[in-house]
Structures are given as C-alpha cells and as structure tokens.
C-alpha cells in the first residue's frame, strides 16, 4: 500500500501525463447513444426523466445525471470528461479496497 508521500508522488507524475494525454481529444465530439440522450434532453427537458426519455428500460437515475450534467456543462467536452474520469477513478479506488 502507498504511503501518503508515495501517493503524492504518483499523483504528481500521472496527473500531468493524463492531462497531456487527453488534450488532443478536446476536438472530439460525443458519439453514438450520447447524441440521442442529449437530443432528448434538449427536446423534452426535465419532463423526459420520468419516462427515461422514451427508452424501453427504466433509466431514471442515469437520465437525471445526464440532465444535470447537460445543464451544468452544456456541450463542452471537458466537464463531461472530468466527471466520467472521476467516476472511473472512484471505481478503481473502491476495487482496490475490495
């Protein structure tokens, strides 16, 4: 297990490398189903959350999350990327402690 000092060193090494690695994808756009979700959010707004934006499965919580992210970040890629990267990092930490 890392000590606090080692953890800081790992962060200081990997975080700048991570930022440098993601900068080229800044011009990338959303793909596949994300277009559908964002279109539905733009069309139906918060009213679409109750029926999961006409999807065939119950997806109210993820629909609410997409709606809130859209309201906070709009179509700017960096905010979305930071949130989803943080969720991946949280999963890695939880898996580590499992």
Image: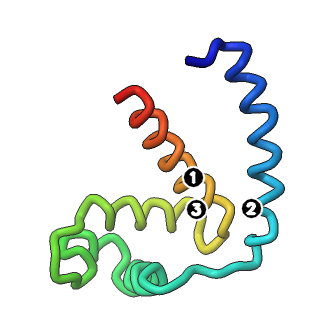
Residue found at x 44% / y 60%: 68
The answer to whether 89 is drawn above or below residue 85 in the figure is above
Which mark is first along the chain, 1 or 3?
A: 3
Mark 3 to mark 1 CA distance (whole Å): 8 Å
Mark 2 to mark 1 CA distance (whole Å): 11 Å
Mark 3: secondary structure: helix
Q: Nearer the viewer, mark 2 or mark 3?
A: 2
Judge the density around disc 1: few (<14), some (14-19), many (≥20) Cα neighbours within 10 Å: few
Residue found at x 68% / y 22%: 7
- Colour setting: rainbow
Which mark is first along the chain, 3 or 2?
A: 2
Q: Nearer the viewer, mark 3 or mark 1?
A: 1
Question: Residues at badges 3 and 1 in contact (C-beta under 8 Å)?
Answer: no
Q: Which residue is mark 3?
A: 80
Mark 2 to mark 3 CA distance (whole Å): 12 Å
* Side of 55 relative to 62 (left or right): left
Mark 2: secondary structure: helix
Q: Position of residue 90 (x, y in %)?
A: 47, 40
Q: Which residue is mark 1?
A: 85
Question: Residues at badges 2 and 1 in contact (C-beta under 8 Å)?
Answer: yes
Q: Nearer the viewer, residue 45 or 20?
A: 20
Numbered tag placed on residue 22 in the rendering: 2
The answer to whether 88 is drawn above or below residue 58 in the figure is above
Judge the density around disc 2: few (<14), some (14-19), many (≥20) Cα neighbours within 10 Å: few
């Amino acid at each position: 297990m890392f000590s606090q000092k080692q953890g800081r060193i790992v962060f200081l090494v990997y975080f700048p490398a991570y930022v440098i690695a993601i900068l080229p994808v800044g011009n990338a756009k959303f793909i596949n189903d994300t277009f559908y979700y964002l279109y539905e959010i733009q069309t139906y707004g918060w009213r679409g959350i109750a029926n999961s934006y006409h999807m065939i499965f119950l997806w109210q919580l993820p629909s609410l999350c997409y709606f809130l992210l859209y309201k906070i970040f709009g179509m700017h890629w960096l905010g979305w990327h930071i949130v989803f990267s943080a969720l991946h990092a949280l999963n890695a930490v939880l898996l580590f402690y499992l």
